Image (tube, rainbow, N blue to C red):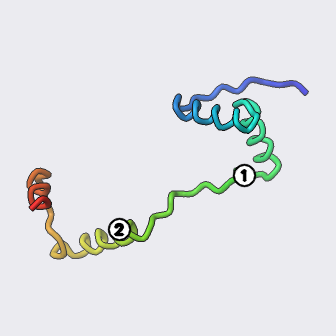
Amino acid sequence: MATTSVTMRIDEELKAQAEELFADLGLNMTSAFTVFVKQAVREQCIPFKISRTEANDDTLEAMEEVRQMKQNPDLGKAYTDVEEMIEELLQ
């Protein structure tokens, strides 16, 4: 089977982390990428779930609070000066 080159750009630190992981698994970057591509072709999709990080309860609560404050500005105080906001928060 003939082979061809694929060139891609990736964050330097991420590449180093991936190479370390793949080495521990007995693979190099080329072998790991080939495994990924073969699995994607076989399944006709990305072979793992791709999704946003799910927000935890605290984050969901904060998001709801902001939504409510946008609907009713009287629920909270708005600031135009970050220093003023920090000063009030530290009191």
- Front residue of this view, candidates 67 and 58: 58
Image coordinates for residue 88, horizontal then vertical, percent: 9, 61
Seen at 14% across and 67% down, the residue is 77
- Count neighbours of disc 2 (C-alpha within 10 A) and say few if under 14, some if 14 to 19, many if 20 or more: few
Q: What element carries label 2?
A: helix
Badge 1 amino acid = Pro
Seen at 24% across and 72% down, the residue is 69
Quadrant where the image shows the N terminus: top right
Seen at 44% across and 66% down, the residue is 56
Badge 2 amino acid = Met
Spatial separation of the CA atoms under disc 2 and disc 1: 31 Å
The residue that mark 2 highlights is 63
Query: In the drawing, does residue 43 fall left or right of residue 53?
Result: right
The residue that mark 1 highlights is 47
Image coordinates for residue 17, horizontal then vertical, percent: 58, 35
Vertical order, 39 against 69 (above or below): above
Seen at 82% across and 49% down, the residue is 42
Please tell me in which quadrant of the rendered image residue 25 appears: top right
- Front residue of this view, candidates 57 and 33: 57
Mark toward the start of the polypeptide (2 vs 1) = 1
Image coordinates for residue 45, horizontal then vertical, percent: 73, 52
- Count neighbours of disc 1 (C-alpha within 10 A) and say few if under 14, some if 14 to 19, many if 20 or more: some
